[in-house]
Image (cartoon, rainbow, N blue to C red):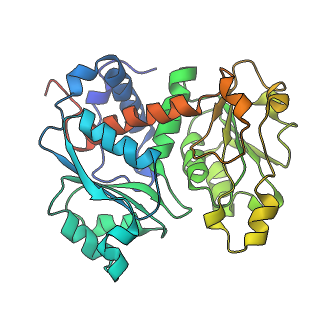
Amino acid sequence: MFNDQSYKEVFMPHHLIDIHDFTREEIAALIALGEDIIVRPQDYQDSAARKKLATLFFEPSTRTRLSFEAAMLDLGGSVLGVASEDSSSAAKGESVADTIRTVQCYADIIAMRHPKEGAPLVAAKHATVPIINAGDGGQNHPTQTLTDLFTLHREFGQLHGLTIGLCGDLKFGRTVHSLIAAMARYPGVHVVLISPNELTAPDYVIDMIKRHGATYEECRTMESVMPKLDALYMTRVQRERFFNEEDYIRLKDSYILNMEKMSLAKKDMMILHPLPRVNEIDLEVDSDPRAMYFKQAKYGMYIRMALLSSILGAGDKNA
């Protein structure tokens, strides 16, 4: 558990590219700050006044982009940016480095999504303002992971000792890779990897689990592990990550969560999903109190408020 002042005692890194850029103590501080923002939003309404956030999204996004923009506006800041590669000079062949050198002239902080893995890291190497990775290829999505951790902590009151299942596309899913990287660092965490053979977690993800000392198991059916899970993280099979349309069509309906499968789960098991959903969760599940994915989307705004406030140096409202 975190005391009310813990978020004031931790210095946040200049950039957030990978969830490993934050220590567990820094994540705890962000969670504590997010909790405080929920309770006392009026205390933070001017904490980013006269600051500008640039959102550079070279891939489609709804929740991540809008939650960043809503977070900055609720902190009293302003927002500018692009919502697609076609609407930026990248369509003319401009490099990431040149884009960042230009945009930093107009903004105090940049949130960037890019289809190429490593693009936000390249941006950070050329930036004089903070860069936040809002998703790069199939590699990282650290602010979604902060959202997931915040949601788990809000509902369970802790992050250690949980058994979490991750289901669907574990090969290409950047949200899954980032969440595993974070959760594996907490004591007593057990990771259950549920996927078809074609979409199993990459070796580097398995190595990461082992390196942090967490335990894990791999399985091919949801039913076999549902009774043991504290949380189930559903993901869609992503068409944009496939090179072969036939493979996508064959695998896209591999795992669908319905009320029959939910009947096997604990009464307090939490269902998470980074969204967008296609058909991997039946609509009937939405009415189950264990379905947390829309509340999770709301929490994403609060934890991004905490992140922006902290990186911009506005986290301590009494400073």
State the residue in front, 107 or 155.
107
Indicate the position of residue 103 as horizontal and vertical percent values. Answer: 21, 64
Indicate the position of residue 286 as horizontal and vertical percent values. Answer: 66, 29
State the residue in front, 276 or 204.
276
From this view, report whether residue 165 is shown above or below residue 199: above
Q: Could you tell whether 293 is left or right of 40 in the image?
A: right
What residue is shown at x 74% (from left), y 64% (from top)? 248
Q: Could you tell whether 127 is left or right of 206 in the image?
A: left
What residue is shown at x 24% (from left), y 65% (from top)? 127
Indicate the position of residue 246 as horizontal and vertical percent values. Answer: 78, 70
Q: Could you tell whether 175 is left or right of 146 in the image?
A: right
Q: Quadrant of the C terminus?
A: top left
What residue is shown at x 28% (from left), y 18% (from top)? 40
Indicate the position of residue 316 as horizontal and vertical percent values. Answer: 21, 29
Asked whether residue 244 is in view, the answer is yes
What residue is shown at x 30% (from left), y 43% (from top)? 12
